[in-house]
Amino acid sequence: MLALVCCALASHPACAQPYPSQPIRLIVPFGPGSGSDIVARRLGSVLQQRWKQPVVIDNRPGAQGVIGTEALPYDPVKDFAHIALIGVGGSVALVPKDSPFKSVPELAAYAKAHPGKVFFGHADTSSQVPAELLRAVAKLPIEGVAYKASANIIVDLIGGQIQFAFFNTMTGSAQASTGRLVPIAITEAQRSPCWPGVPTVAETYPGFEVTFFVGVSAPRGVPPDVVAKLHDAIREAQDDPKFKAPLEGVGLTFVRQGPGQYADFIGKEAQRWREQIKAAGLVAQ
């Protein structure tokens, strides 16, 4: 139930030549190591092998993804050709390995006893929204610190400048595997097979659920045959174990949809999230 986390595809095929006749650029509105970046790089490799054209990953982090999407440029409602949904997932709350907080209840109890002493970092929607929702639902006197990229959050989290942060499970899995950061909760409604020993936030605060989704879109005006060709390529990638298995292993659940269904999915998710924001008393940004 979270707004778009998207790999935006920009390409300008020549009318007289079959697509793709030149390099493809995948614009990722977040920094290296983000969930959308991880998916984009794996997808880029698949497309490059399939079409024998270079695929350039163009990271445009900052402003919760706005910088990257403005690089197209486009109106997010009218000028967007939604090509395909790749998958959905959740976020995970990480703390330093030497943190005194081993669970969300412990973190909440400390925050309430020490107002203004607990800080969380955020660089995109999958890191900010869960923390903001937790603050609202649990009525915690905690403060957020904005970062340009997840990598900067990780440095300060390990260094003790902030006390916790949410990451999408793909980024969080990589960081937890180093042993420097420890997962204390996930934001999905049920426990994940990838994190069997990690409780959900909902086990402490019933009804708490935040998920993200990753998909591919292009500027309006891309020819329908190109959209169809890209959609088919992504559908085939979803069935490729070399593409699918590593991402499923870090928490991404693949979703197969027919042509045109991604736009409907985005519309429904946007409405659902507006209702979540209202229910939590948050201010939409």
Image (tube, rainbow, N blue to C red):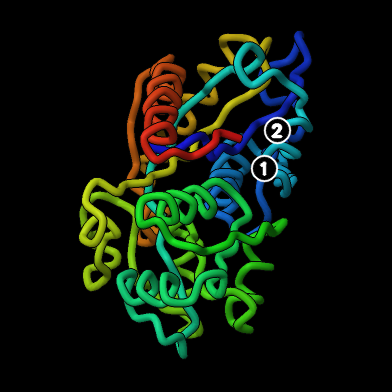
Residue 86 locus on image (x, y percent): 43, 37
Q: Is residue 168 left or right of residue 103?
A: right
Contact check, label 1 and label 2, Cβ < 8 Å: yes
Question: Quick check: 166 above or below 240?
Answer: below
Q: Is residue 22 left or right of residue 94?
A: right
- Residue 260 point in image, percent of width and height: 43, 14
Looking at the rendered structure, the secondary structure element under dot 2 is helix
Residue name at image x 48 percent, y 70 percent: 174
Location of mark 1 (residue) = 29
Question: Would you name the residue on which mark 2 appears?
Answer: 69
| Amino acid type indicated by mark 1 | Pro
Decide if residue 203 is on the left or right side of residue 99.
Answer: left
Number of marks in picture? 2
Q: Secondary structure at mark 1?
A: loop
In the rendering, at what x and y percent does residue 190 appear? Answer: 21, 53
Residue drawn 45% across the image and 85% down it: 99
Residue 273 relative to residue 49: left or right: left
Q: Residue at x 54, y 36 (%)?
A: 283
Q: Judge by depth and name the residue closer to the eye, 127 or 197.
A: 127
